[in-house]
Image: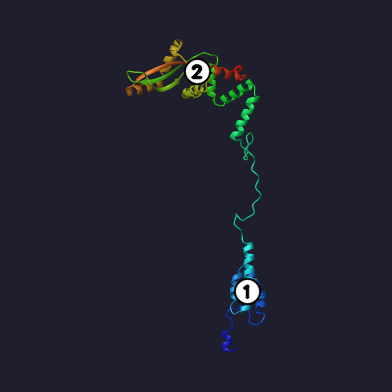
Amino acid sequence: MSKHEADQTPADADGPAEGPGSFIGFVASGAWKLATGAPRRAMDLAQKGLSEAEKLALTTLRKRMDAVADDEAPHDEDDAPQPPSRPAAATPSGMAAASGRLTAAAAMARLMEESLEQTAEQALERLALRTVRQLVPDEARILAALVDGHSAALVHVGAGPLVGPASQRWLENLSPVGRECGVRLLDQIPTYLANLRNLGLLESGDEDKALHLKYQLIEADTLVRKTCGEIEKAGLRVKFFRRTIRISEAGKAFWNACEGVGNQSW
């Protein structure tokens, strides 16, 4: 082999041989490169020193391989086939929403239907049940203590200028009724009485002179005396509002609706 012929020998031992049919030989001997996942690199190496016809054939093969690679590549989520969506459930009045929750329209429609079908006794039962759900056990004890109709002492502590009406309320709904009936949270008695009054189960009345001693005991309470001192330090005048607390007519109806409660020993 001459020096010139040696210079023309391809430096890459993996390259194709020259001569007719070299492209077919390349494809056969270089198929393993395609299997290794580097088809384009093998094509680029093979194109060196090839004829125009072979280059054209390689280009065609590359395009086909690119098309196959594109088909096998993962698609975007937007392009992926989606399962058929379920039709949304109809939500007219009287039907539940697709989520299974009752809609406001459906709930109102149900109430309207029941209002046409219920009896007076059933209506009272529903009203009583709603009221029961707004009570805590201590409040139930207070109501039970007053269900016989007697009045309990009630005091509000007010404040005002030295001359003029006492328009400010510093303490409200102070009564011994909670302690007497055995509630657990004595400091919450004013809150209990306020809730029972707001629900219409208890009502306030005028001062009862027969409860004079009860009023004095309330006004001598430690918290009351401390509050009175704060009022006086503020340059105001202390005013005690003596009232009574008793069960209302609505409270009696509610208690009667709670059938069987009055027969129990609490």
Q: Amino acid at mark 1?
A: Leu
Give the side of residue 165 with respect to residue 174, left or right: left
Residue 22 x %, y %:
65, 79
Residue 43 x %, y %:
61, 73
- Tell me what residue is drawn at x 59 percent, y 87 percent: 5
Identity of the residue furthest to the front in this view: 92
- Tell me what residue is drawn at x 45 percent, y 15 percent: 243
Relative depth, front residue between 30 and 46: 46
Q: How many marks?
A: 2
Q: Quadrant of residue 20?
A: bottom right
- Tell me what residue is drawn at x 62 percent, y 65 percent: 69
Mark 2 surroundings: few (<14), some (14-19) or many (≥20) residues within 10 A: many
Q: Quadrant of the N terminus?
A: bottom right
Residue 16 x %, y %:
63, 78
Question: Which residue in the structure is indicated by mark 1?
Answer: 58
Q: Nearer the viewer, mark 2 or mark 1?
A: 1
Residue 170 appears in the rendering:
yes
Relative depth, front residue between 146 and 77: 77
- The secondary element bearing badge 1 is classed as helix
- The secondary element bearing badge 2 is classed as strand
Relative depth, front residue between 121 and 177: 121
Q: CA distance from mark 2 to mark 1?
A: 100 Å
Residue 266 appears in the rendering:
no
Q: Quadrant of the C terminus?
A: top right
Question: Which residue in the structure is indicated by mark 2?
Answer: 203
Compared to 258, does 96 lie above or below?
A: below
2 and 1 marks in contact (CB < 8 Å)? no
